[in-house]
Image: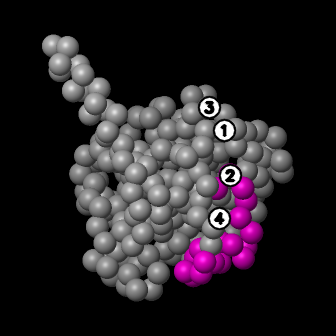
């Protein structure tokens, strides 16, 4: 029994792995309420400013979660959620702003960046290099506590509470997170393949993660129009 406990402890310690995922993507082939990826941030701190960028490829028209952070105090800590094509929601500490008229497409790579500044509360979405209007969310707040960061599912509890109807189906790549608000020029470098400073919280080129369920790591070259990134 003691040996079993030791082996289980070793498995849990080695379950998370760090990889350079340059040129690779996470593929979520089916909808579910279980399949997901847990990301481990490189820093644990109080966040007063945040930028998250990623690229998504999907043909799903229903609502789905692109990026989900839950905190001990709230499940909707920082969430990029897509209720339908051209519309995105950004949730910060349980409050949401909806952004309309953002030009994205099915079955191509769409570049998505979200920024938030606690000092002013101003939040903004950038989709394929085009900015949304700026909207206010939770001015004067901060993200406090050890974050649970998940791809593929939207958290309705701290690290869980998944719903099949909100799961992501498709491919995700180039996920980065910064503890600052990136400038429009920096977001343009990310969007159009220029040289940019990788995320100092989440860095796709040195990412610690743990896959759970049916999630595949593949080369981006297996996807359509991968050479357009």
Nearer the camera: disc 4 or disc 3: 3
Looking at the rendering, in which quadrant would you find the N terminus?
A: top left
Q: Report the front residue among 102 and 8.
A: 8
Query: Which residue is at 47% across, 58% downward?
Result: 206
Residue where numbered disc 2 is placed: 179
Q: Is residue 8 visible?
A: yes
Q: Residues within 10 Å of mark 1 (few under 14, many from 20)?
A: some
Are circles 4 and 3 on residues that touch, CB within 8 Å?
A: no
Residue where numbered disc 4 is placed: 125
Which residues, given as a range, are shown in magenta?
Answer: 178-195
Whichever of labels 1 and 4 marks the residue nearer the N terminus, that label is 1
Query: Which residue is at 25% across, 46% downward?
Result: 213
Whichever of labels 2 and 1 marks the residue nearer the N terminus, that label is 1
Residue 174 sits above or below residue 209 on the image: below
Q: Report the front residue among 145 and 63.
A: 145
Tag on residue 62?
Answer: none
Tag on residue 45?
Answer: 1
Whichever of labels 4 and 3 marks the residue nearer the N terminus, that label is 4
Are circles 1 and 4 on residues that touch, CB within 8 Å?
A: no
Q: Is residue 88 visible?
A: no
Indicate whether residue 182 is drawn in magenta: yes
- Mark 2 → mark 3, Cα distance in angstroms: 14 Å
């Amino acid at each position: 029994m003691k040996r079993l406990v030791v082996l289980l402890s070793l498995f849990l310690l080695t379950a998370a792995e760090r990889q350079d995922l340059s040129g690779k993507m996470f593929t979520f082939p089916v909808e579910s309420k279980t399949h997901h990826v847990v990301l481990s941030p490189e820093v644990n701190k109080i966040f007063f400013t945040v930028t998250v960028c990623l690229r998504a490829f999907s043909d799903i028209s229903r609502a789905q979660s692109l990026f989900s952070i839950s905190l001990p105090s709230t499940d909707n800590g920082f969430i990029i959620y897509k209720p339908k094509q051209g519309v995105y929601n950004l949730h910060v500490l349980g409050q949401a702003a909806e952004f309309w008229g953002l030009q994205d497409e099915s079955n191509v790579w769409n570049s998505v960046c979200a920024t938030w500044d606690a000092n002013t509360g101003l939040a903004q979405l950038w989709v394929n290099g085009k900015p949304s209007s700026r909207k206010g969310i939770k001015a004067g707040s901060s993200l406090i506590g050890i974050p649970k960061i998940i791809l593929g599912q939207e958290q309705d509890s701290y690290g869980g509470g998944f719903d099949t109807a909100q799961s992501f189906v498709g491919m995700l790549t180039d996920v980065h997170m910064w503890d600052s608000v990136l400038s429009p020029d920096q977001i343009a470098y990310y969007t159009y393949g220029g040289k940019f400073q990788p995320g100092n919280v989440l860095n796709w080129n040195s990412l610690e993660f743990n896959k759970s369920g049916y999630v595949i790591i593949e080369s981006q070259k297996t996807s359509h129009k991968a050479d357009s990134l």
